Amino acid sequence: MGKTYERIDGRLRTFIESQPVFFTATAPLSDDGTINLSPKGLKGSFAVLDEHTVAYLDFAGSNAETIAHLRENGRITLMWCAFQGPPNIVRVHGRGEPVFRDDPRFPGLLAHFPGIDPGPHGLRAVIVVHAELVRDTCGYAVPFMSYDAERDLHEKRFAREDDASLNAYFTKKDHIATSLDGLPGLPLPLPPSTV
């Protein structure tokens, strides 16, 4: 039923690039630390960089658990489910890193996301994941669900922010600069946007 892949290409790449939502899972090293699971969407915010590397845009939100966990230990799992068509679940287990707006690699990474304007979403980082294990499973128990449209609420909320107000928003939130478990999260003040 399940299969392990040596690379992200062909049918596998087509599948993950066509899904409107995926999930990220991370955890701190501490045995009693908080495990984080996050849905990710926004059409055009995910890209396959090469056969062993994927990336997604990390936008403004209420916390920065994924960033904090990646800064501490780099472990991450990404998962896609087929909610339409043939059943399938794909997981990419690997090591990730947040590439922040002041990193020299940042502009080059943004070139991989031509289908989205990151400006109105409060872009914080590009999360780059190097795959160590790629597997699929049957997905027989995943229900059929229809994809109707993208929500425009995130863009409407953060389009009115500039770098100064976005930094103020992040600073007043409890779990942006520091995770739920006290790990370093998003570095503040936020570096100026290059987009």
Image (spheres, grey):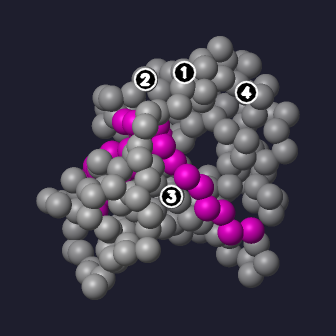
* Foreground label between 2 and 4: 2
Residue at the spot of label 4: 167
Asked if residue 61 lies in the magenta stretch, the reply is: no
Residue type highlighted by circle 2 = Asp
Q: Are marks 2 and 1 in contact (CB under 8 Å)?
A: yes
Is residue 169 positioned above or below 33 on the image? above
Identify the image quadrant of residue 71: bottom right
Query: How far, Cα to Cα, is label 2 from label 4?
Result: 19 Å
**Image check: 128 left or right of 74?**
left
* Foreground label between 3 and 4: 3
Helix, strand or loop status at disc 2: loop
Helix, strand or loop status at disc 1: helix
Residue type highlighted by circle 3 = Phe
Query: How far, Cα to Cα, is label 3 from label 4?
Result: 26 Å
- Seen from this angle, which residue lies furthest bottom? 1
First in sequence: mark 1 vs mark 4: 1
Query: How far, Cα to Cα, is label 3 from label 1?
Result: 22 Å
Q: Say few, some or many: other residues with alpha carbon within 10 Å of mark 1 (under 14 / 14 to 19 / 20 or more).
A: some
Q: Nearer the viewer, residue 144 or 122?
A: 144
Asked if residue 50 lies in the magenta stretch, the reply is: yes
Residue at the spot of label 2: 117
Q: Which mark is residue 120?
A: 1
Residue at the spot of label 3: 23
